[in-house]
Image (spheres, helix red, strand yellow):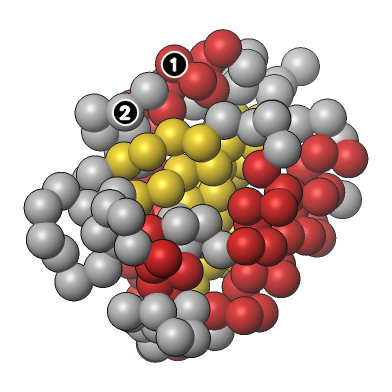
Amino acid sequence: MSTPALVVIDLQNDYFEGGAFPLWNAEPTLAAVEKAIRMARAKGLPVVFVQHVAQGPAPFFNPGTPGVKLHDRIDALVDSSPVVTKQHADAFEATGLHDTLQGQGADELIVCGMMTQNCVTHTAISRRADDYRKVTVLKDASTTVSEILHLIALSGLANRVNLAAVDETFA
């Protein structure tokens, strides 16, 4: 029997209206991520949150700013789930993500979040992700700067990982 874990990447204030780098489709993506979290928990699956914190001055996600914080609606869902802090696009790079997932018995990954072509993709096809039996990217619970870039990133992932919608993943 496999144990998938939901990995929620960078649902942070800077990516929403009023933030330093608002993304296309951010609000519908937020709603889809919330749904994925609830559905994963209803199935007893582990959920791990990932938060990017910039090193030194950066265009966004600077330490101590409101923009670096998890969106309030996501923060309200963290509960006792782990939050892994990262400084690279690949959420496994120089973090405890792999150990956290192993500690929860995860052998499959379900990845969602922001930005599709960057942190979502780099995490899903990370060398460390090869340690997992299956990797799925939630195409309706991820977004980036534009619809076309989102679709291009998903197309690039199509031959490497499973692409699925929230409802079909947790049905």
Relative to 9, does residue 44 appear above or below in the rendering?
Answer: above
Quadrant for the N terminus in the image: top right
Residue 47, given in percent of the width and then of the height, sits at 65, 36
Q: Residue at x 26, y 68 (%)?
A: 60
Residue 125 visible in the current orientation? no
Mark-to-mark CA distance, 1 and 2: 9 Å
Q: Residue at x 41, y 65 (%)?
A: 66
The answer to whether mark 1 and mark 2 are in CB contact below 8 A is no
Relative to 25, does residue 10 appear above or below in the rendering?
Answer: above
Numbered label attached to residue 95: 2
Residue 113, given in percent of the width and then of the height, sits at 51, 59
Identity, as a three-letter code, of the amino acid under mark 1 = Asp
Residue 118, given in percent of the width and then of the height, sits at 30, 61
Q: Residue at x 71, y 71 (%)?
A: 31
Q: Residue at x 81, y 50 (%)?
A: 38
Q: Is residue 143 left or right of residue 157?
A: right
